Image (tube, rainbow, N blue to C red):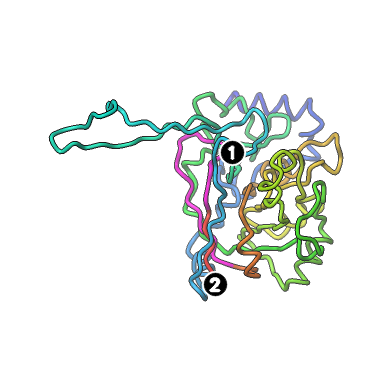
Amino acid sequence: MLLRTLALYLVTSLCTTASAAEQWWPSKWGEKDELGQFNQLGPDLTLKAASLIKTGKTYRLGIETNSSTPAPAPRNFNLTVLMPNQAPGQSLGDNKFNYADDLMSGWMGVGSQIDGLGHAAIDHVFYNGVHSAEFVKPAGLSKFGVQNYPPIVTRGVLINMAKCLGKDVLAEGTAYTKDMIVECQTKQNITIGAGDVVLLHSGWLDVLDSDPKRYAAGEPGIGVSGAEYLASLDVMAVGADTWGVEALPFENKNIMYPIHQNLITKRGIYLLENMDTRELAKDGATEFMFILGPARVTGAVQMIINPIAIR
């Protein structure tokens, strides 16, 4: 507690980014909260989401993850498959049992992923005013770890930004402003409510298939005013068919990842990256039941995921 108090005093006193006028903590969920907008989860949202199931069709929103999946440096992903203690021709026991295991070496922030509240900060101050010195440890986070996430079941909505703007694939750097998102909502008759997971479709995953280097070099995504607007609606998470959710190049080249700071750090809103929204967009889906249960890896900052949408 002493360490936290001292760290926060120094940050608040010396850093303009965390000045008293801009202080975003304590969270509306309390000064000890570690879940942010996941506090909204519960039977009411589950029942609301279940009522959206009309056809029973399911959609997997995760992309394949492998050694070729583009990711910001130095992230990488490698998988090795072994048959332990089974040299060629050998088996175990009189019944000649064999098995294969897999060894993963890589980063959780590769492929489809959830960005947790221990991922983004402003001058080392994370969600709810927690300084990195207090909880970021080499062996895992002591706060905000993925293992504490509740089952995530809620209403999901898809805004087809590409269709709204009359394109198959939006160009990198296209920033979704508040006015742009509202216009697309109106055109597609979409409402957004508290606790929703909002997914934005740009067609950018088609670039991953055709030009992986271009895919990783930039992307269309949420702009500053768009993030403020979505946050004002009390959404639970925001996701996109891009690797960073926000527009790159940034709207201001000197302001790095402002959407991560605004939504994760200040608001406790989770980001879902590399969501495969193509099938939902093809079917014209605008709302669905959203389900996610990330692997409970103790102390993990992020997690590779494959959420499910059900209509």
The correct choice, above or below, for 92 with respect to 260 in the image is above
Disc 2 crowd rating (10 Å Cα; few below 14, some 14-19, many 20+) is some
Q: Residue furthest bottom?
A: 54
In the figure, is residue 107 to the left or right of 167? left
Image quadrant containing the N terminus: top right
Alpha carbon distance from label 2 to label 1: 31 Å
The front one of 74 and 89 is 89
Q: Position of residue 251 (x, y in %)?
A: 85, 44
- Residue that mark 2 sits on: 52
| Along the viewing direction, whichever of 70 and 192 lies nearer the viewer | 70
Q: Amino acid at mark 2?
A: Leu
Q: Quadrant of residue 137?
A: top right
Span colored in magenta = 288-306
* Picture quadrant where residue 93 is located: top left
Whichever of callouts 2 and 1 sits on the residue coming sooner in the sequence is: 2
In front of the other: 171 or 24: 171
Find residue 250 and report its image quarter: top right
**Of the two numbered discs 2 and 1 in the rendering, the one whose residue sits closer to the viewer:** 1
In this view, 130 is above or below 220: above
Picture coordinates of residue 34, whole percent (x, y) = 56, 42
Say which amino acid is labelled 1. Answer: Val
Q: Nearer the viewer, residue 229 or 185?
A: 185
Give the numbered dot on residue 110: 1
Where does the image place residue 228, in percent across and percent down from the top left?
Answer: 77, 53
Q: Which mark is residue 210?
A: none
Q: Position of residue 185 (x, y in %)?
A: 75, 67
